[in-house]
Amino acid sequence: MTAAGFRRGLVAALPFLLSNGAAGLVMGLTYKGLGLGAEHAILFSLLVYSATAQAITLSMWAHPLPVVAMVVACIATNSRYLLMGAHLRQLFGGLAPRKVLPTLFQLADASWLMTSSDADRNGPDAGYLLGSSIPMAIGWVGGTALAYAAPLAANEPLRLAATLLPTMFIATLLPSQWKNVRSLWPWLTSAVAALLVARFVDPSWSMLIGGGCGTLVSMMEPKDA
Amino acid sequence: MHDLKVLGVICILGVTCYVMRASGYVLAASMRDDGIAARFLQLAPGNLFIAFIVGGCLSGGLAGFVGTVVALATMAITAREWAALGAGFGAALAASALGL
C-alpha cells in the first residue's frame, strides 16, 4: 500500500466525482420524492453505498418495511462482491487484513475494475484501491446530499451522465485488458451472455453471469486468454 | 414511519452490504494459489469488464452505445482518459438530442 498508488488512484478516479455525483443526485431526488429525510438519505448512501442495492430496496419501500426481503435482495444483487473480494485477496494477500478490510467498505464495481487494470500495469497496490474509492464515495454521498440542499430536478443530461460515464470510463480501461487474439472468444462469450441475462433474467446479474461465462471459456484455452 | 425503525433498516442493509464486500476477501484466504478457483479469478477481470460495459450500454440505450464506442475509439487513439470521456459523453448527448 503506497502513497504513490493512492495518488494515482485518486487522480484517475476524479471523473467519478461527476458521474457518481449525478447518480447520487438522482438517487437523492428519488429519496426526497419518497418522503425520506435528508439525514436518512445521506446515511443510506453512506452505509449501503451501492446503487443497485439502494435502487432495489427503494423499489421495495412499503409500510411496514419488508426487512428480510430487502436483506435477501441486497445479498443477491451484491453477490458479485464475493468474486471481487476473492480476486483482491489474490492481489493483496501479502498485506494484513486489518489494512485492506476497512477499504472494502467503499468497494465498488468501478474501483475494483480500475484496481485490477492498474495491477496489470503497475503491480498490485492497495493504496490505488483506497485512492480511487474516495472520489467515487464523495460523489455518491455528496450527490445525495445535494438533492436536498439545492432546488434541482432530474433532467436528461444528468440521467445520461449518471448512466453512461461509469460505462465509458470502464471502456477506456478495456485496451489494457486485451492480451492477444485469444481474448476474443471469451470476450464475445461475456458480451453475449451479459446481453442475454440482462434481456431475459435481470440486468443486475449480467456482469456476474456474463463475466463468469467468458472466464470459463478463458479457462479452456491452453494459455491465459 | 418511525425514524428509529428506518434508521435500523438502513444500518441492517449497510452491514449486509459490507459483509458481502468483505466475505470474498476473507474466504479467499483458504484458497490454494494454484487451484482452479485461483485461475478463474486471475482470468475474470477482462471478462467482467466486457459484461459490465454491455450492461451499461443496454441501460443507456443507443445513445449510450454510441458514447461508449466513441470513448473507446478516442482512448485507443489518444490514450487520454479525459479526452475519451469528453468525446464519449459529447457523442452520447448529441445522439440523445437527435432522438437516438
Image (cartoon, rainbow, N blue to C red):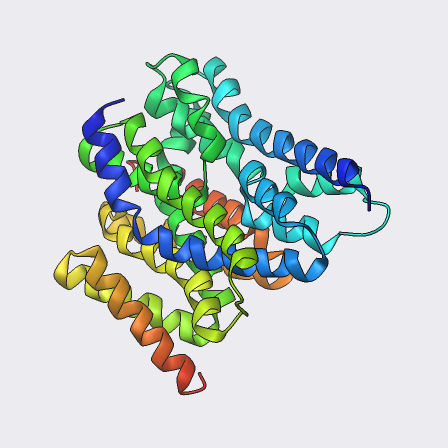
Q: Is residue B22 shown to the viewer in this render?
A: yes
Identity of the residue drawn at 34% across and 33% down = A129
Q: Quadrant of residue B38?
A: top left
Instruction: Tell me where residue A98 appears, x and y as whole percent.
Output: 43, 14
Instruction: Tell me where residue A112 appears, x and y as whole percent.
Output: 39, 38
User: Is residue B57 rendered to the left or right of residue A70?
Assistant: left
Q: In which quarter of the image is residue A2?
A: top left
Q: Where's the C terminus of chain A, which quadrant?
A: top left
Q: Give the camera-side residue of A37 and A219.
A: A37
User: Is residue A95 rendered to the left or right of residue A216?
Assistant: left
Instruction: Tell me where residue B33 appears, x and y as whole percent.
Output: 38, 18
Q: Check the image and report above or below for A15 versus B21.
A: below
User: Is residue A175 rendered to the left or right of residue B98?
Assistant: left
Q: For the view shown, which residue lies furthest in the right direction?
A: A64
Q: Is residue A189 shown to the viewer in this render?
A: no
Q: Give the camera-side residue of B75 and B37.
A: B75
Identity of the residue drawn at 46% across and 46% down = A211
